[in-house]
């Protein structure tokens, strides 16, 4: 997700009866404990294969933290 996706999600979330804010909505990379300040995933569209591989690595690094977060929400 990048900034344009975030705006899209927040616009739609504003229509919900349950409040959703930009503190509720998080970038996938925010679940990667090794991620620095960069939280957006780079869009590899039209770029070399290495950009797709880098994006895959970024997603793979964030998924364990996302799973832990979701498990906490469902307890």
Image (cartoon, grey):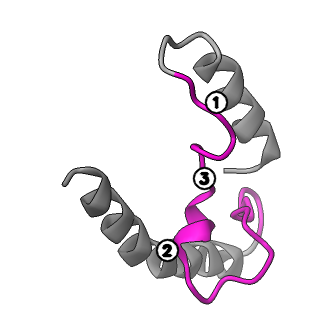
Apparent side of residue 61 relative to residue 4 in the rendered image (left or right): left
For marks 2 and 1, the one nearer the N-term is 1
Q: How many marks?
A: 3
The residue lying at 71 percent from left, 39 percent from top is 6
Is 68 in the magenta? no
The residue singled out by tag 1 in the image is 9
Residue 10 image offset from top left, x and y in percent: 68, 28
Residue 14 image offset from top left, x and y in percent: 65, 17
Q: Are marks 3 and 2 in contact (CB under 8 Å)?
A: no
The residue lying at 62 percent from left, 18 percent from top is 12
The residue singled out by tag 3 in the image is 26
Question: Alpha-carbon distance for marks 1 and 3?
Answer: 11 Å
Task: Describe the element under mark 3 as helix, strand or loop.
Answer: loop
Q: Could you say which disc has been placed on residue 62 in the image?
A: 2
Give the residues drawn in magenta, as a range: 19-47
Q: Could you say which disc has been placed on residue 30 in the image?
A: none
For marks 1 and 3, the one nearer the N-term is 1
Apparent side of residue 48 relative to residue 64 in the rendered image (left or right): right
């Amino acid at each position: 997700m990048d900034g344009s996706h975030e705006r899209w999600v927040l616009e739609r979330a504003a229509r919900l009866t349950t409040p959703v804010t930009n503190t509720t909505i998080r970038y996938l990379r925010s679940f990667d404990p090794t991620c620095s300040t960069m939280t957006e995933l780079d869009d590899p569209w039209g770029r070399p294969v290495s950009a797709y591989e880098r994006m895959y690595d970024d997603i793979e690094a964030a998924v364990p933290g996302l799973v832990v977060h979701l498990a906490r929400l469902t307890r």
